[in-house]
Image: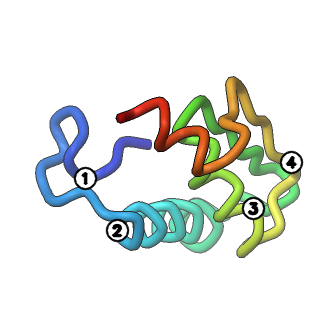
Amino acid sequence: MEYKGYGIYNGEISAEQIKHDSLRVYNHMCEKIYIQEKNIFLFGRSIGTGPACFLGSKRQPGGIILMSAYTSIKNQSNNCL
């Protein structure tokens, strides 16, 4: 999934928009494509692990796979400064 403000998807980047987009894609898979939740596996890499964990806490996917996850927001923000 590509978030607003990244790649070719124009728009403002915000945590709320990322949450909204994540839920929208997940709901679309369940409601329009008829994929059962148990067959959906979330994958988050690096900064994408945050949205994957958020989505996993709001829905019941078959599993969550995290790759190169950050250990804390504090550590992540220190790396960016």
Q: Residues within 10 Å of mark 3 (few under 14, many from 20)?
A: some
Which amino acid type is shown beneath numbered disc 3? Gly
Which residue of the protein is positioned furthest toward the top in this rendering? 68
| Residue that label 4 marks | 63
Along the line of sight, which residue is nearer the eye, 37 or 70?
70
| Residue that label 1 marks | 4
Classify mark 1: helix, strand or loop: loop
State the separation of the CA atoms marked 3 and 2.
17 Å
Q: Which mark is residue 13?
A: none
Please provide percent x and percent y for residue 37: 79, 62
| Residue that label 3 marks | 56
Please provide percent x and percent y for residue 63: 86, 48
Classify mark 2: helix, strand or loop: helix
State the separation of the CA atoms marked 2 and 1.
8 Å
If you read the primary sequence from the N terminus, does the residue marked by circle 2 or circle 1 appear first?
1
Which amino acid type is shown beneath numbered disc 1? Lys
Rendered view: 10 above or below 7: below
State the separation of the CA atoms marked 1 and 3.
20 Å
If you read the primary sequence from the N terminus, does the residue marked by circle 4 or circle 3 appear first?
3
State the separation of the CA atoms marked 1 and 4.
25 Å
| Residue that label 2 marks | 17
Q: Residues within 10 Å of mark 2 (few under 14, many from 20)?
A: some
Which amino acid type is shown beneath numbered disc 4? Gly
Q: Residues within 10 Å of mark 4 (few under 14, many from 20)?
A: few
Q: Quadrant of the C terminus?
A: top left
Please provide percent x and percent y for residue 79: 47, 30
The residue located at (43%, 72%) in the rendering is: 20
Which amino acid type is shown beneath numbered disc 2? Gln
Pointers 2 and 1 in contact (C-beta within 8 Å) = yes
Tell me how many marks there are: 4
The residue located at (59%, 49%) in the rendering is: 74
